[in-house]
Image (cartoon, rainbow, N blue to C red):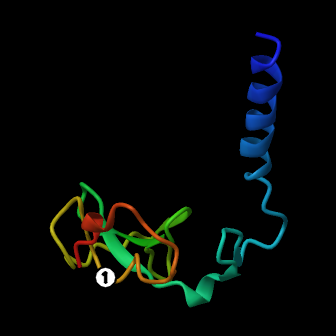
Amino acid sequence: MNLLKPLVLIGLAAIVSGCAKGDDKSYDAGVDKKHLSQLKAGIWVDPEGCDHWIIDDGVEGYLTQRVDDYGKPICSGAAPANTTVGPFKRGSDFFDPRPELVTG
């Protein structure tokens, strides 16, 4: 029991330290660090039919709603609701154990 407590604390410290990315949010802080503009985005269509930019680089992922110049959601009809299209998993060489999630 004495050995388990320090191991758990070290594990929790390692997990929390992964959350501290720094101030510059324009860079991917993962294993294959690069500027976010070098990652490939796809479009995820939410249940309401509106578009969201999606990027998955194997470990981390990014998602943001697509909006027009006035801040209104873009609902383009690019795909059926709850599906994703585009090369959103192709911006990284990091191994992804679930490639079957690529739908476009």
User: Residue 12 falls in which quadrant of the image?
Assistant: top right
**In the rendered image of this protein, does residue 75 appear above or below residue 20?**
below
Left or right of 31: which side holds 20?
right
Image coordinates for residue 32, horizontal then vertical, percent: 65, 77
Report the front residue among 34 and 99: 99
Left or right of 54: which side holds 98?
left
- Indicate the amino acid at tag 1: Gly
User: Residue 36 falls in which quadrant of the image?
Assistant: bottom right
Report the front residue among 24 and 20: 20
Image coordinates for residue 96, horizontal then vertical, percent: 42, 66
At 51% from the left and 72% from the top, the residue drawn is 57
**In the rendered image of this protein, does residue 27 appear above or below residue 7?**
below
Report the front residue among 52 and 100: 100
Image coordinates for residue 61, horizontal then vertical, percent: 52, 64
**In the rendered image of this protein, does residue 69 appear above or below residue 13?**
below
SS state under label 1: loop
Residue under label 1, please give it.
86
Image coordinates for residue 101, horizontal then vertical, percent: 28, 64
**In the rendered image of this protein, does residue 62 appear above or below residue 27?**
above
Residue 50 in view here:
no
- The residue sitting at the bottom extreme is 38
Left or right of 85: which side holds 25?
right
- The mark tally for this picture is 1
